[in-house]
Image: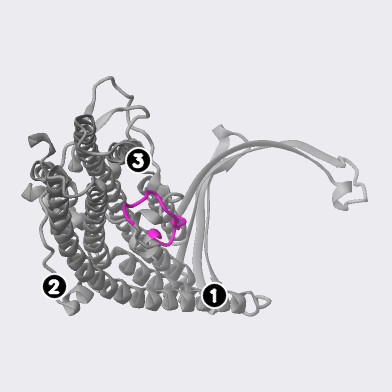
């Protein structure tokens, strides 16, 4: 009877749930696991990945609450593999996964390249204000036909064809803008845009941390499902054996054995599905962090469950507006658009440039002498055919769009913070209810087995109690995952996902 004891089975479940430690992440651990929703997938002005799902979350969660439902077609779901696969099984801790993701994830690599593009644009605008210096060496020969130049008359002793004439010249040529307000403002605008892209790179780092964290967390939850399925299968095997023994002893009908057999096969199918899902989630995690194709690995990080201590709503909102890199990037874009708007207006203003050159010239290098030229040019725009007016209108439209996007993002941040706090409160209550349901389901199974052993009833009650326990375990796993997602959502909304992960790892 020991092998059939529900108490022993419950202990096995308890081994699984702490082993589901997986999902019992402390506050800061959960900060890191959620991929961003909506516009969070847009790290900045130069990188706008599409949104879709990159991993299936356990349970029946809606797309808005499921961090795995929005990244499958995003660059953050891919990577550039690092190294080659080995025959050894790689132990992969959470810290290792994060570090690999920050090195190899495709999203952050693309955004890093975007920062180079923005830096190049700034240098391009700056070049209009810097001196341009060139050096040339020229050796040429020329023959002139006077008749072709209009000298149709002829003079005695003077040929109509002069030359060939040899000319040698070398020198340095310098051009420098002395004042060009249009170029100055464009350079300022490009500098602000570069800062915006740098903030976007920080957003990309957070998205990588969230994508890796979610993939790691989902993989751990699938491992926990495998443990649960194995425990359910062991219980079903024990009950089937008990029913078969009682049938042989003539104390129970054959239908009890058939029910037990059906339940056993159902649990076998559940285990097959759980193992397959676990293997697929490992593949997803490997893709996100850039493991070599075919590299086997095991997850080594486990963390106990801890409630999440939240700040006040006002503190969360204040921190989000002060630290979220996507919001700071949008603010820099507004400043950039303002500068480009001033630059467009500055096309009406005069500009002052200077140019000069110094070198030597002559018939040949040995008979050359110094030559130079220097001058300044004041350019006063009078009428450019409406081009300046068109540039001003386009810059004004871009500025208005940037301001509108900033205000929209501010409202979105407020929504995300409030929504995440509501989800966190509801998810915490769901965890408590689900935990109680598991206890009740274990008690129900215990009583049903006792009644079956005592011959008071058939094993239909036992099978139903098994189903109820399996459903309660699944609800518990799903509610824990939802609780973690709510924590992650709040961390992302407030804007300290990567910082939270680092704090967690330091405590570990």
Between the C-alphas of marks 2 and 3, the distance is 36 Å
Residues at discs 1 and 3 in contact (Cβ within 8 Å) = no
Question: Where, by quadrant of the figure, is residue 80 drawn?
Answer: top left
Q: Is residue 279 shown in magenta?
A: no
Neighbour class for label 3 at 10 Å: few (<14), some, many (≥20)? Answer: some
> Label 2's element?
loop
Q: Which residues are magenta?
A: 41-59
Neighbour class for label 1 at 10 Å: few (<14), some, many (≥20)? Answer: many
Q: Badge 2 is on which residue?
A: 311
Query: Horizontal and vertical percent for residue 103?
Result: 29, 41
Question: Can the viewer see residue 354 in this picture?
Answer: yes
Q: Badge 1 is on which residue?
A: 347
Q: Badge 3 is on which residue?
A: 277
Q: Residue at x 36, y 33 (%)?
A: 81
User: Viewer-nearest of labels 1 and 2?
Assistant: 2
In the image shown, does 210 or 58 lie closer to the viewer? 58
Between the C-alphas of marks 1 and 2, the distance is 50 Å
User: Viewer-nearest of labels 1 and 3?
Assistant: 3
Of labels 1 and 3, earlier in sequence is 3
> Label 3's element?
helix
Query: Horizontal and vertical percent for residue 410?
Result: 34, 76
Q: Main secondary structure of the magenta part?
A: loop
Query: Horizontal and vertical percent for residue 141?
Result: 70, 35
Q: How is the image coloured?
A: one colour
Taking the view exactly as shown, the residue that stands out farthest to the front is 250
In the image shown, does 51 or 389 lie closer to the viewer? 51
Question: Where, by quadrant of the figure, is residue 48 drawn?
Answer: bottom left
Q: Is residue 43 shown in magenta?
A: yes
Of labels 2 and 3, earlier in sequence is 3
User: Viewer-nearest of labels 2 and 3?
Assistant: 3
Looking at the image, is 277 positioned above or below residue 476?
A: above
């Amino acid at each position: 009877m020991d092998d059939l004891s529900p108490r022993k089975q419950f202990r096995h479940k308890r081994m699984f749930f702490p082993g589901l430690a997986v999902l019992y992440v402390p506050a800061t651990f959960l900060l890191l696991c959620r991929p961003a929703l909506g516009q969070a997938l847009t790290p900045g002005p130069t990188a706008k990945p599409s949104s879709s799902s990159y991993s299936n979350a356990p349970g029946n969660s809606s797309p808005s609450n499921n961090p795995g439902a929005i990244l499958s077609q995003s660059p953050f779901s891919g990577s550039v593999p690092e190294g080659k696969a080995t025959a050894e099984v790689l132990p992969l801790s959470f810290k290792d996964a994060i570090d690999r993701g920050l090195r190899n994830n495709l999203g952050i690599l693309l955004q890093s390249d975007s920062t180079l593009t923005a830096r190049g644009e700034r240098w391009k605008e700056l070049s209009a204000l810097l001196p341009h210096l060139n050096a040339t060496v020229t050796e040429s020969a020329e023959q002139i036909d006077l008749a072709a130049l209009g000298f149709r008359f002829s003079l005695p002793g003077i040929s109509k064809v002069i030359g060939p004439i040899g000319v040698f010249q070398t020198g340095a040529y310098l051009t420098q803008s002395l004042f060009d307000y249009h170029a100055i403002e464009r350079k300022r605008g490009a500098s602000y845009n570069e800062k915006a892209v740098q903030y976007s790179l920080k957003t990309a780092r957070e998205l990588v941390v969230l994508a890796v964290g979610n993939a790691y967390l989902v993989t751990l939850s699938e491992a926990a499902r495998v443990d649960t399925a194995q425990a359910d299968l062991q219980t079903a095997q024990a009950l089937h054996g008990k029913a078969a023994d009682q049938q042989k002893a003539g104390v129970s009908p054959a239908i009890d054995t058939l029910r037990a057999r059906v339940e056993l096969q159902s649990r076998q199918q559940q285990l097959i599905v759980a193992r397959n899902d676990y293997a697929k989630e490992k593949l997803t995690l490997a893709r996100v962090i850039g493991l070599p194709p075919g590299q086997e690995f095991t997850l080594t990080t486990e963390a106990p469950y801890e409630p999440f201590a939240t700040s006040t709503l006002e503190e969360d909102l204040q921190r989000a507006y002060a630290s979220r890199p996507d919001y700071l990037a949008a603010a820099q874009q507004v400043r950039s658009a303002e500068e480009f708007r001033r630059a467009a207006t500055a096309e009406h203003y005069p500009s002052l440039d200077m140019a000069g050159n110094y070198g030597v010239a002559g018939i040949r290098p040995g008979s050359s002498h110094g030559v130079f030229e220097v001058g300044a040019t004041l350019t006063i725009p009078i009428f450019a055919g409406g081009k300046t007016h068109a540039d001003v209108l386009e810059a004004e439209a871009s500025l208005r769009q940037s301001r509108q996007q900033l205000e929209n993002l501010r409202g979105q941040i407020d929504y995300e913070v409030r929504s995440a706090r509501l989800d966190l409160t509801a998810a915490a209550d769901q965890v408590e209810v689900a935990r109680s349901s598991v206890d009740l389901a274990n008690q129900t199974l215990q009583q049903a087995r006792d009644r079956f052993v005592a011959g008071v009833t058939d094993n239909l009650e036992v099978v139903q109690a098994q189903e109820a326990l399996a459903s309660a375990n699944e609800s518990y796993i799903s509610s824990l995952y939802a609780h973690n997602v709510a924590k992650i959502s709040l961390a992302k909304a407030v804007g300290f996902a990567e910082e939270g992960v680092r704090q967690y790892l330091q405590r570990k």
